[in-house]
Amino acid sequence: MATVGRMAGVSQVTVSRALSDPSKVSQETLKKIRDAIDATGFVPNAIAGALASQKSMLVSVLVPSITNITYTSMISPFNAVMRENGYEVLLSETGFDLEDEEKLIAAHLSRRPDAMLLTGIRHTGAARRALLGASIPIVEVWDVTETPIDQCVGFSHSEAGRAVADFVIDSGYERAGSVSAGDERALRRKTAFAERFARRSGTDVAEVNFEAQASLANGRAGLAELIDQQGFKNGVIFCSSDILALGIMVEARARGLSVPEDVAVIGFGDQDFAAHTDPAITTVRVDREALGREAAKAMLKRFSGQTPLQPFTDIGFEIVRRKSC
């Protein structure tokens, strides 16, 4: 800043003032300072500024996957709203292991973010204690609970599973299976689906569960196991994601089976390709863009000191019926 000040013909204090609050210096002086910054390539020390102002203007965002559109399509609108309000986003990928998430939470908190966005409501005890001790706004997304760390924005995964069970029974299906990835939210949907279907139909759901993330390969393997090892036929399969549903359809076609005549399929997430497969995938849609915007609004309200009337915002879900079921 001293070098910038000398080049602009102003004091170092004036440079600091221009960087922290441009409205406090004249437009002429501000232009000289900015020209000097451009010439020198100077990057202001945000850490020093944060120590002085007690604000970093950084918001941490932790998601399980940065390649999964389920999460990236939420981050984009969240980032847009936060940036409009002067905040930048620091993003990390946690995977689906809570111990890994705990380490990243600690790493982010050491950077002193002004707030943190987390995926899900399940965290290790150590992570919860660290988050509570940080005394910053925390918004948990993709789930709802009456007892969040601070605020949560999402929907009930158990209710989604039960809604799908009601949907398939009301559609006349008497047999059902499920193929699920291993993340905790997917397993809650699967469990709720199985329990509701069994209670209403009197028939247990055939299950295939994978510890790994959803993939086309696991979708194909899931249908193969249901048919070859569990004798599944003439029923509907609820998948924890659209990518698994697509894998099941690929395997069905390879076996000469018709969808939905021989095996019906329901996905989850309404990813971009779901409406354009043959047949198009029946799925559970969650408005991911609305989720990102509502999460940003909840965080900004906490910055302004507003106390919410309830601890969560439920954005809901809808079942989109297409040709696969």
Image: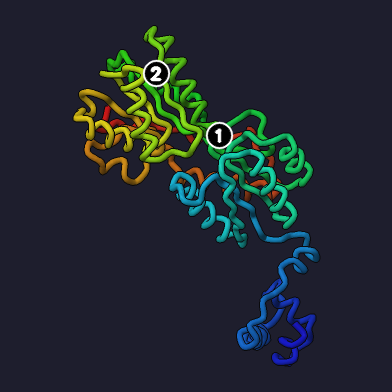
Residue at (70, 92) in percent of width and height: 7
At a point 46% along the width and 51% down the height, the residue shown is: 67
Q: Residue furthest top?
A: 202
Neighbours of disc 2 within 10 Å: few (<14), some (14-19), many (20+)? some
Please give the residue where the numbered disc 1 appears in the rendered image: 143
| Residue 192 image position (x, y, % from top left) | 48, 20
Q: Amino acid at mark 1?
A: Asp
Q: Quadrant of residue 222?
A: top left
Going from N to C along the chain, the mark reached first, 2 or 1, is 1
Q: Gap between marks 2 and 1, in whole Å?
A: 26 Å
**198 sits left or right of 133 in the view:** left
Q: Picture quarter containing residue 196?
A: top left
- 255 w.r.t. 10: above or below: above
Circle number at residue 206: 2
Label drawn at residue 272: none
Q: Please, what is the three-letter code of the amino acid marked with disc 2? A: Ala
